[in-house]
Image (cartoon, rainbow, N blue to C red):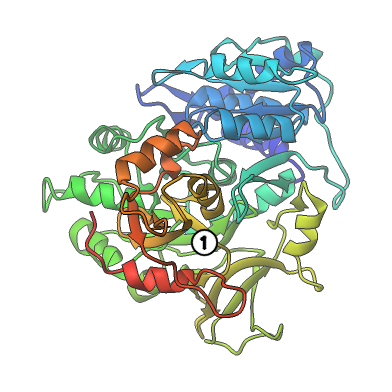
Amino acid sequence: MASIWQLIEARAADSADRTLLIAEDDSRITYGEFRERAERVAAGLAGLGVGEGTRVTWQLPSRIDSVVASAALARLGAVQCPVLHLYREKELGFVMRHTAAEFVITPGEWKGFDFRAMTDGLAAQMDPAPVVLSVGELPEGDPATLPPPPSYPDGDEPIRWIYSTSGTTSDPKGVQHTDGTLLAGGRGLADALEMGPDDVGSIAFPFAHIAGPDYLIMMLYTGMSACIVEAFVPDAAVAFYARNGVTMAGGATAFYQMFLAEQRKQPGTPIIPTLRALSGGGAALPPELYREVRDEMGLKACHGYGMTEIPMITQGSPSDTDEQLAHTTGKPVTGAVVRIVAEDGSEAPQGTDGEVRVKGPMVTKGYTNPELTAEAFDEDGWFRTGDVGHIRPDGHVVLTGRLKDIIIRKGENISAKEIEDLLYAHPKVADVAVIGLVDRERGERVCAVVERVVGSDDDLTFDEMVVYLSEAGLTKFKTPEQLEVVDALPRNETLRKVLKYKLRETFADKPWP
C-alpha cells in the first residue's frame, strides 16, 4: 500500500458500514462516512490553495473532526506538521517558523484556552503569514473538483509528515516521515496486538502524537473500531468504554495506573467487561505494575517500544507469556530489525547490553537538519536510538537505560537541557542539572538539582522555581515535580562534567513528595 489515502479508500470500499470512530457523546462515523467527509474537506481546503506539498501545521485534540482533517490533508498530499495541544506559544511558534507553515489549523477555543488567538498572534509575526483556520469551520467542497490522489513509484515517496521531538537539545528536532514509514509502523502494531475487525480500541492519547496515525493505520488494516477521547478522565472514560464494548485499552503506563485505581473501587467486578488486554508504551512498565494488572483486572498488559523517529520497534503480544510481558518490551514488530551494538561498534553478544540500533521500513527518513540526520545513522545505515538494552534468547528485547539525556514523562519527551538553560539564569542558581527519576505513575518524574550560590543561605524554593519557569515560557507539563538544592553538583575530574548518574543514585530512593 503506497499511501495512507489508498488504505482509507480500500477500507471504505470493503467496510463502508462498519464503525470507525466513536466520540464521547456516543456519536460515531463509519469507514464510508469518514472517506466521504475527508474528501469534502479536502475539496474545501483545495479551494483555499492547499495542495500537494503544502506545509500545514495542525494543533488539534483527539476527536473525530481532527482525524477527518488529517485524512483530508493526506488526500491532498500536503505535508502535515502536527503539534501537541499541550504546547503553547514557544513550541507552536518554533514549529510554524521551522517548517515555514503555509496553513495552520487550530481547535479554536478549547478547554478554556483560545488557541485561535494564540495562533493568529504567532502568524502575524511571520512573513509571509500563514492562513489560520479553526477545525470546526473548515470549508467543504465538491470531491469531483479534486485532482487524482498523488501517487509515487515504490522507494520514491516524498516527505509527508514532520513531527517535532525534544531529543537532547533545547529546540525541537523535525522528524521526517513518509506515508510508507507510518504505514509500516501501523502494520507492525496491528500484527503484534493481534487485532481483528470485531475489536474496539481506544485513542485516549493526543492524536497529534506519532501514535495517532500509528493507531489509525492499525484500525484501517484490521477494520476495527475505536473510542476517541479528548481529555482522559478515568471514571468517565471507563463508563464510555464499557458502554461501547472496548476490548483493548491503554496508551501508556500512567493509563494502566488509572485503570487500576478505577478497578479498585469495585474489586472482583470488571470495570469494562469486554476488555481483553491493555496496551501502550512511552515509558517503562514495572514488572510489579504488570502483576497488579494481571491479578486485579485479569488482563495482560502488552507493552511496546517506539519513538517519534520509529513509531514501532518492539511490541508485546496477547499470546506472549506473563513473564515475557512483565520483563520485556516484546519482539521486534513486522519489518523491524534490531541490533545491539557494543561500545567499540561491534555487535554485542546475545544477552549483553549495548546501544539499540534499528533498520526497517518504519524508520524515519531523517531530520530536517541534515547534520542531525548524519549523526543519527551509523555507517551501515542503522538508526542509533540512544537506548541501551539487550536481546534475550527468545527474541524479546529488554531496555535497561538510555544514552540520550531526555526524560520521558507520561510518554512525552522532555529535554533536560531546555529546563537547565532556563534555571541557570536564576540569581539563586549557581549551576543546575535536571534528571529523570523513576516514577510509578509517570514513568519518570522531572527533578531539578540546583547548586546553591556560594556564600548564600537564600535557597531557591519549589514555588519560586515553578513561577519562574512559567514566566520564562516553559510549558506546564515540563515543569519539574521535584527540587533538590545541594552545595555542589558531582563532577568528573577531567572536563568537570556533571555526573547525572550519581544524582539519580542519590535521589532515587528519597521519599517524594
Mark 1 packing: few (<14 Cα in 10 Å), some, or many (20+)? many
Q: Is 103 or 122 nearer to us in this picture?
A: 122
The answer to whether 57 is drawn above or below residue 250 in the figure is above
Report whether residue 37 is seen.
no
On the rendered structure, is 231 left or right of 492? left
The answer to whether 298 is drawn above or below residue 206 in the figure is below
The answer to whether 271 is drawn above or below residue 352 in the figure is above
- Residue 456 percent across, percent down from the top left: 36, 54
Label 1, secondary structure: give it: strand
The answer to whether 2 is drawn above or below residue 331 in the figure is above
- Residue 37 percent across, percent down from the top left: 61, 19
Image quadrant where residue 104 sits: top right
Report whether residue 435 is seen.
yes
On the rendered structure, is 345 left or right of 324? right
On the rendered structure, is 506 left or right of 164? left
On the rendered structure, is 403 left or right of 4? left
- Residue 486 percent across, percent down from the top left: 36, 63
Name the kind of residue labelled 1 in the image. Answer: Tyr
Q: Is 7 or 158 nearer to us in this picture?
A: 158
- Residue furthest to the front: 455
Task: Identify residue for label 1.
Answer: 305
Image quadrant where residue 324 sits: bottom left
- Point 67% across, 34% down: residue: 95
- Residue 200 percent across, percent down from the top left: 41, 41
Q: Is 46 or 258 nearer to us in this picture?
A: 258
